[in-house]
Amino acid sequence: MTAQIVTFARTTQTVQDDARSLPGATIAYAPGEEIYAQAEETDLIYRVISGAVRTTRLDSDGRRQIGDFYYAGDFFGLEAGPEHRFSAEALCDAQIQVLKRTSLALADDNAGIERMIWTATARELERTREHLMMLGRKTAREKVASFLYDLADRQGGEVQTLTMGRQDMADYLGLTIETVSRMITQLQAEGLVTFMGCRQFRIGNRPALSRLVAA
């Protein structure tokens, strides 16, 4: 546990130091608080300083889609069009840096900022492509394994924290909440992951989990 806390603290501090070079205000959000709404104008760009964020979309039939989850250092709200396709909410207490596109264009290090945002946009497109491939090609067991493996890579440390609930995982993976819970139980029985309560886990057998994810 200590190793994870130290790693997370260093990551947050690094992001906070980096944020000082960007011309934006940092705003605190409570768990469940909306950061921006679906169909809102895209005149702002956002970056997670600490905490975690979920993007969601409600379809015309009332079904919910989850776009992605974002952690310290991640940019979000990057859109090609004039409106946000998803809304964004804080999953826990979060510090979010809010950046105006017009201010970024006038910044002293405009070229450096443009490169940073281009890299974030390319990463976002790649994650979207991987998500679509996962939904279309992987089994339920492989989907849950991929989700946990990806989360472990993004958070680092020995112990990972699930800032989202089982329903969020289910909606993101295109599964039912019962199937997600059943697959987590199965992965634990196989020794691939170990859960300490509902919201914390560690990878039990990384090579075996990696082979499953790559299947």
Image (cartoon, helix red, strand yellow):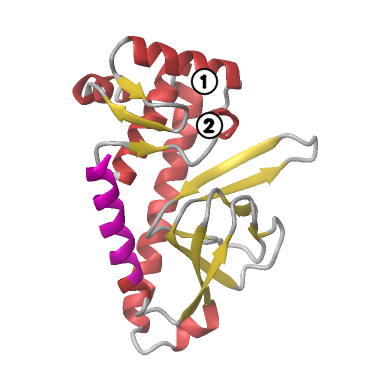
- 7 magenta-colored: yes
Is 112 located above or below residue 130 in the figure? below
The local crowd at label 1, few if under 14, some if 14 to 19, many if 20 or more residues have their Cα within 10 Å, is many
Is 78 located above or below residue 163 in the figure? below
The kind of secondary structure element at disc 1 is helix
Displayed quadrant of residue 11: bottom left
Displayed quadrant of residue 151: top left
What residue is shown at x 25% (from left), y 51% (from top)? Answer: 7
The local crowd at label 2, few if under 14, some if 14 to 19, many if 20 or more residues have their Cα within 10 Å, is many
Q: Identity of the amino acid at label 2?
A: Met
Q: Identity of the amino acid at label 1?
A: Val
Lateral position of residue 68 relative to residue 153, left or right: right
Is 88 located above or below residue 150 in the figure? below
Identify the disc placed on residue 180: 1
The kind of secondary structure element at disc 2 is helix
How far across and down, in percent of the image, does residue 210 sit?
25, 25
Callout count: 2
How far across and down, in percent of the image, does residue 182 sit?
50, 13
Per the model, the C-alpha gap separating discs 1 and 2 is 7 Å
